[in-house]
Image (cartoon, grey):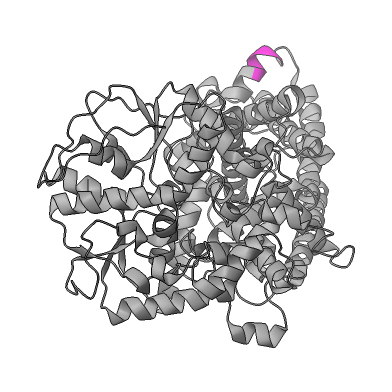
Amino acid sequence: MDAFLANAVPTREVFGNISPWMRLAFYALMLASMGFLAWRVAWRARLWWQGRPGGFERDWRVWIRRLAVYAAAQKRVHRKSLGAVLHILLFSGFVVLTIGTTLLAIADQGPVNFHQGTYYLLYELTMDVFGVALCVGCLLALYRRWAIRPASLGHQRSDWLVLAILLALGITGFLLEALRLRYTEVEPAIARWSVIGHLIDLTLLRGLDLETSRTWHLWMWWIHTLLVAGLFVAWPVTRFLHVLTGPLNLALRPERHPGALAPISIEEVEASGQTGVAQITDFNRQQLLSLDACMECGRCEDACPAWATGKPLSPKAVVVDLRAAMAAPNASPLHGGVIRPDTLWACTMCQACVHECPVLIGHVDLIGDLRRNLVGEGQIAGPPAKALSVTWRQFNPYGRPESDRMAWAAGLSVPTVESHPNADYLLWIGCAAAFDPRSQKVARALVQLLQRAGVSFAVLGKQERCTGDSARRLGDEFLFQFLARGNVETLNRHQVKKIITSCPHCLNTLKNEYPQFEGTYHVHHHSQLLAELLQSGRLSPGDTPSSDPVTLHDPCYLARVNGETEAQRTVLQAPSQPLREMPRCGSKTFCCGAGGGRMWFDDPPAQRVSTLRAAEAAATGAKTLATACPFCLNMMSDAVARGGPAEGMAVLDIAEILLQRQPPSHGLPPLPPAHP
């Protein structure tokens, strides 16, 4: 009997009360169950290896950083919700108990038994604390699945099994601890460190004789052992697999800016005879691994604007359906069978799903690769097909001739790269501001602000072409590359170094995708330059023509994709005109519905994302809706014009608002107040 004396070093036997043959049976059972786990994981790995070679991040420093931030610190899970709380409890409890069990095995089988003294006491306390975390997390998860049942959360019978096993492991572990304390008669000063076991011993086991407690301990040990083996068996055939594949995907997803899609080359197309992904094995190996990393938590679906407006796209369902196809690649055709075309076309590529995913699954990359194949096979029609066609001919999706590129600047003295070759900044106008009448007003306002501030700038004029953002995201990769290479050649010929643009989509393409074609520039959004000019005193915050509050719609490709959330707020700051934020703002903003080439689709009124967003803006009580993107300006203006709760709200770009506030200067009067 392991009776502790008052002056003894605190410790305990690892296999106390367990006979030698039982230990052999224990190791045989563990080897068998762990062997099944390894076999199933190896089988899944063979499925990943069906894909194209490559796609894995190879920098070990990136692995460590991601695992520390996203796995250990649970960065994407931290938010005020029951799901986040229970996942952190489950994660921390499981990880610490697993580490603790591994350390116990090392101490027992290794050359030095360090499981004693102060270490032992702290070990017992730590295991109890995180054992409670595991049990509480399981109970909260069971409650959430039974009572709340979020629609976006995946629901499978096996989830109940895994949670039940984990909860039973926690409970039997505490009962084992209490029975051990009882039959070994551990002194209270030491037993108190095993907090939960000590409490169970004092309350539920009081009066239990030593022989009975020893027998109960043996039975409980076998139950606990069988539960551990059951967990190993259930692990690879249930959603619990993400405990292994999630960290793998976190480490191995390629390090690439979220706003940059991976390029494909003509050589690849000639070698394969196709563009994009036609069958599941056309994805690369990392992408197939990422399918197994999905835990079906539903965060991507909750954030998806397409799903919120009744479209057929669920980012979670896309991943789950592709995962099923990976295991049975010949069961159904990928296009039109596993994934319908209207599902793919519904995506705005706003990156909300990717931004929310705890294990960094690249939903947008998956959809983009599938779209490329649809376009390559000619399976695109209607307005988006027309936009691509006229872009090939006229170098802009509006189908306007190059001679109209400077029509927006009529009456303004706008310098070009020919007349002002040494300008500090190139002002990239973009197709919307060049050809759309509403966006042209933004370009004019921005030019007047730059002139008032004495900024040295020039424009390309008729040499400017579409950046290719819509073409790439619709899936016409070669149209994008044609435009990108032409623009890079023009920019490099004029030795452009710094670019300003009012379009976040142009910003993203010029900044994050043109380096793929040897076009590297310092690209700034107009909100960033205007904020600098305000802070340096070169522009005045001025007086507001109205004290009515204003609300801000953050463009996805500015706030979420490129991380700029403060500059536009700096521009809007005014003592007499309060800014009222919408619930979904900053990097958590909600899409306007125009991204991913959706600008060129015609949605039914009930499925327009902008209508939902306009209602959110109206709920703030603001009279003016500010934004900083021509696509957002267009979509939100249309939503307001359709009536509803936002009817009568003025929709303005931040440059227009700032120009209205400017005092008369250099003979340039401020703009009159805008009307909705």
User: Residue 35 placed where, x, y %?
Assistant: 79, 60
Q: Would residue 248 appear left or right of 283 to someone viewing this image?
A: left
Q: Position of residue 464 (x, y in %)?
A: 38, 70
Which residue appears farthest toward the front when viewing the image? 411
38 is higher (above) or lower (below) than 453: below
Q: Is residue 203 magenta?
A: yes
**214 is higher (above) or lower (below) than 201:** below
Q: Position of residue 356 (x, y in %)?
A: 55, 45
Is residue 258 shown left or right of residue 568? right
Q: Kindly tell me whether residue 9 is visible in this rendering.
A: no
Report the front residue among 185 and 394. 394
549 vs 326, nearest the viewer: 549
Asked whether 569 or 429 is in front, the reply is: 429
Which quadrant holds the C terminus?
top left
Asked which quadrant contains residue 374, the reply is bottom right
Q: Is residue 184 magenta?
A: no
Above or below residue 526? Residue 211 is above
Quarter of the image with the N terminus is top right
What range of the chain is rendered magenta? 200-204
- Give the camera-side residue of 254 and 171: 254
